[in-house]
Image: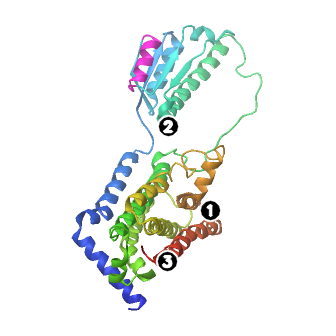
Amino acid sequence: MDFGGRFIGTLRRELAHLGRDRWDLGMLTLFPACAITVVAAMLIAAVPRGLPVAVLDQSNGTVSRAIVRAVSASPAVTIAARPTSMVEAERLARAGQVWAILSIPEGVDRGLTRTDTPAIQIFYNASFLTIGGSAESALQSAVSAVLAEKGLDALRARGLPAVRISPPKVQATVLFNPQTSFEWYLQALIQPAVLHLLTACVVVMAMGRELRGKSLTEWQRETGGGLAALLGKLTPYLVALTCWGAVWLIWLCGVRGWAMNGSLPLTLFAQGLLFAGTAAISLLLVIGVRKASFAFSASALYAGSALAYSGGTLPLDGGSGFARNWSAALPFTHYLRLQMDQFLGAPVAVALPQIGVLSLYVVVPMALVMLLLRRPEA
């Protein structure tokens, strides 16, 4: 049988199996749909709003009341508790009822006209760094605005000039994601990572199903074996998951309106390469070890850790040598660099090295798979 005949025959065989097995079909249809829907629903608010905080006002003066009003007006937080002691405030934080505590000590009003200004303190829950940091930032902005206004008022009341020396001003400008949206940032990380992991698992599931003991002899006899049979085996899974990747990008860029300033076709092509390389690695694990359980574990290890070691969530510059090397060895790291570059509008030429690396993740494992299939089975 020629190459095309073996490819078509294996493809039809795999499609017939998916038509019979609802669970395997669900892994390509229902599960990705649920994953995309759940992540999109979680992040559609884009920016955290109404985070509960506690305000401990031990001053109860004009300045402290102005601070409380400013905090109440902030859309990012809501005052959920007014404890009377720090012990009570810490209990609320430990119980997860508030994400941050604003402590206003006695003497804040007097401190504006004296040198011994008491410290206004903000405590936040760093166990949940993103949410706690957002609450802390909102409190900090509200407090700073009130103190700046009240400080000027105090100087004017004493007949002093508002500004004696004009210090250099520092301006920070957000170049990208000016809305500080978690929807854009986290969806760009999570959705392709989920599909990457799913690709690794479904390919192990599909190829592991053909093992008879530790042998693939029967599968090779039925399909003709070789590269054509492998491609026919993988095609339904790669096409389905690449389509889901396109659905995600259409949702994020077409429906939600987040701009892809670079090349969307290039990003889709790179995503297809990522899934193809992931499938090739999973094939290598199954055919090399001839044990589906090991291949599942190894796939969960390299694909499941991809997001954490990609550099998108935690910085790797100060990490250990192992962390940096493991990150560089993962295909998802190279895809994510290309994707984020294209979101930001980088030239196509910048993406070519990553395209080359992603192509190697397809070619090298598939070449090793072909060598292993020629190995006599025990």
What range is drawn magenta here?
84-97
Determine which residue is flagged by label 1. 346
Looking at this view, is 368 or 326 the one in front? Answer: 368
Mark closer to the chain start, 3 or 1 = 1
Query: How many C-alpha atoms fall within 10 Å of the one at disc 1: few (<14), some, or many (≥20)?
Result: some
Q: What element carries label 3?
A: helix
Amino acid type of the residue tagged 2 in the rendering: Thr
Residue 236 colored magenta? no
Q: In the image, which is nearer the foreground, mark 2 or mark 3?
A: 3
Magenta: main secondary structure equals: helix
Residue under the image location 44 percent in, 17 percent down? 89
Q: In this view, does 143 lie above or below 8?
A: above
Amino acid type of the residue tagged 1 in the rendering: Ala
Looking at this view, is 324 or 175 the one in front? Answer: 324
Determine which residue is flagged by label 2. 130
Q: In this view, does 306 lie above or below 75?
A: below
Task: Residue 309: give x, y in percent of width and height.
Answer: 55, 50
Amino acid type of the residue tagged 3 in the rendering: Met
Q: In the shown orientation, is residue 26 left or right of residue 373?
A: left
Residue under the image location 36 percent in, 55 percent down? 36
Determine which residue is flagged by label 3. 370
Mark closer to the chain start, 2 or 3 = 2
Q: How far apart are marks 2 and 3 (CA)?
A: 46 Å
Task: Residue 289: give x, y in percent of width and height.
Answer: 45, 65
